[in-house]
Amino acid sequence: METDSFFPVDDPLEVIGIIKESLGDAFSIEELLWVIESVFVLNRIAIQRVILPPDKTGRIFKLRDAVVIQINNKLDRDHAQCVFCHELGHVIFNHVCETAIGYDDFMGLFHAGRIEDLAVAYRDHSNIFDDPQERAAEDLALLLIECIERWEKSLPEIAHDIFGTE
């Protein structure tokens, strides 16, 4: 999997500027994924809601041919969206080491209940501010969420433009 990108390392403001050049000030998660998949030449970014330990909100597996972002299934929609953007920040900043297996093998392990056989690096941190990589991922997540929320708020206006509804 290609990991070089034009994204500056750990500079959330520059990254959001580059993303906004492609998508504007408001965009959907789907549009964001399309840009990230294009930059990293990924076949896919898979998002899974899974059972995780209560103190873990998300984790990432960077596979040979995909990235899997797993989000704790106990989180509400808004919290899950924030966790997704945070984990995506780690992908963008290349904080995650690649594993040797591909997506199909990963899914086989997942369905067999053997996903824990893969090494998962949870950062041992008490908050997002005590680790520079966590801080960078969180700062970018906040900037991404702002754009996604702006897009979501524009949906009634878009519907009006398309359907002429009041």
Image (cartoon, rainbow, N blue to C red):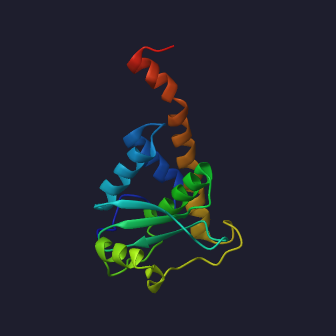
Q: Residue at x 49, y 66 (%)?
A: 70
In the displayed image of the protein, which residue is found farthest to the right?
A: 126
Query: Outermost residue, front direction?
Result: 112
Count of numbered circles in the view: 0
Q: Quadrant of the N terminus?
A: bottom left
Question: Which residue is drawn at the image coordinates 57% and 61% (left, top)?
Answer: 73
Please provide percent x and percent y for residue 54: 66, 70
Percent x, y for residue 120?
50, 80
Name which residue lies at 47% across and 15% down. Answer: 165
Give the answer, above or below, for where 19 lies relative to 93: above
Instruction: Give the x, y percent position of residue 159.
Output: 44, 23
- Which of 144 and 83 lies nearest the eye of the viewer? 83
What percent of the width, then of the height, locates residue 100?
Answer: 32, 82
